[in-house]
Image (cartoon, rainbow, N blue to C red):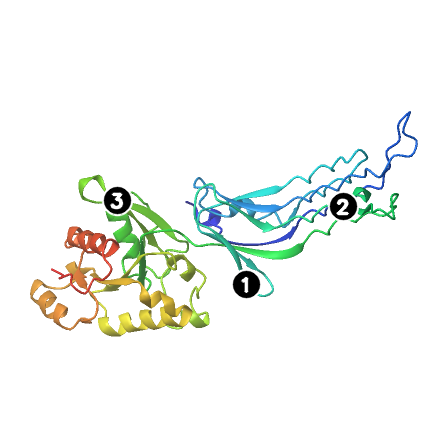
Amino acid sequence: MASSNFIDYVKILCRSGAGGKGSIHFRREKHVPKGGPDGGDGGRGGHIILRGNTQLWTLLHLKYRKHVVAEAGSSGEGGRRTGAQGQDVILEVPIGTVARDAETNELLLEITEDGQESILLPGGRGGQGNDHYKTATNQAPRVSQPGEAGLEQWIILELKILADVGLVGFPNAGKSTLLSVVSAAKPEIADYPFTTLVPNLGVVAYRDHQSFVMADIPGIIEGAAEGKGLGTRFLRHIERNSVLLFMVAASSENIAKEYEILLNELQKYNPELLDKQRILAISKADLIPADEQKSLLKILPKEIPSILISSVTRHGILQLKDLIWQALHTDSLNSIATE
């Protein structure tokens, strides 16, 4: 997926259709010169609807569509005929799309399933015709109800990637390399910070023809929650991950400190992220001697399962998959022993 085509945030002005007005009409036939009221109701205005589509991976198709306007309902007619409903506008969006009020940031709805349809802005109700206003003392009412106005609102659509495992780490921690090794994904890989500028997804094959989805997001740096580096722009993509795989390079001066910095940034962004299953992978293990690897494991954080891996030599990759699979299918990793 080209980076220029990955759009995970759009702001659009939506306006649902107004309801049609009720009709003021009286029955008039050859032998019924003074029939009663028979004005029909106005039609409902068109809704603005979001529909989930698994074939979409980005909000690119909505990037240049700044105004979304639904059709108004038609007015009622004589003979108690209801006016036609305004045509709904259905916006196809990727699974994991969240809609928010642009002014209050209130969560309006989220799309989590293929084919799921949710009304973003309802159309206005049609007005009642004069047939509804007849009484014993007023048999010829010349009053009807106007249609309800449609709603107009600035809406923010955000895409939160749905994946089983989210990779969390500093730039150049080896996240993209790992994804390219365990899946068919081909993220850009280079020896400089912030090579990854957009999230990448990969399907990881596991034992017995099973699989899980892994997401690589751009690297986090200290102060990301305050907007440094790429800020929190892509942190939303790990909110839906079941397991967070923290990655720190074996060449780091202080692995435990880097892990704490990453954990702190996630806590500042959303404390609920710390409730997720966590695994710590020390990448680029091929850069340190074998005798140092054993001593390195002894100083790693004890509250989280840890493992040494190398995407170049494939050391520890299968064991890492085992850890991830167990994390995805158990409530706690406390009982899982790392190798």
- Residue on which the image places disc 3: 211
Q: Is residue 105 visible?
A: yes
Nearer to us of marks 2 and 3 is 2
Which residue is farthest left?
Answer: 291
Q: CA distance from mark 2 to mark 1?
A: 33 Å
Query: Which labelled disc corresponds to residue 92?
Result: none
Looking at the image, residue 48 sits to the left or right of residue 165; the answer is right
Q: Camera-side residue: 241 or 310? A: 241
Q: CA distance from mark 1 to mark 3?
A: 35 Å
Looking at the image, residue 141 sits to the left or right of residue 273; the answer is right
Looking at the image, residue 117 sits to the left or right of residue 230; the answer is right
Above or below for 49 versus 259: above
Mark 3 nearby-residue class (10 Å; few <14, some 14–19, many ≥20): some
| Percent of width and height locating residue 66 | 63, 50
Report helix, strand or loop for mark 3: strand
Query: Which labelled disc corresponds to residue 128?
Result: 2
Report helix, strand or loop for mark 2: loop
Which of the 4 image quadrants contains residue 73? top right
Query: Which labelled disc corresponds to residue 106?
Result: 1
Report helix, strand or loop for mark 1: loop
Above or below for 77 versus 137: above
| Percent of width and height locating residue 166 | 32, 57
| Percent of width and height locating residue 158 | 50, 55
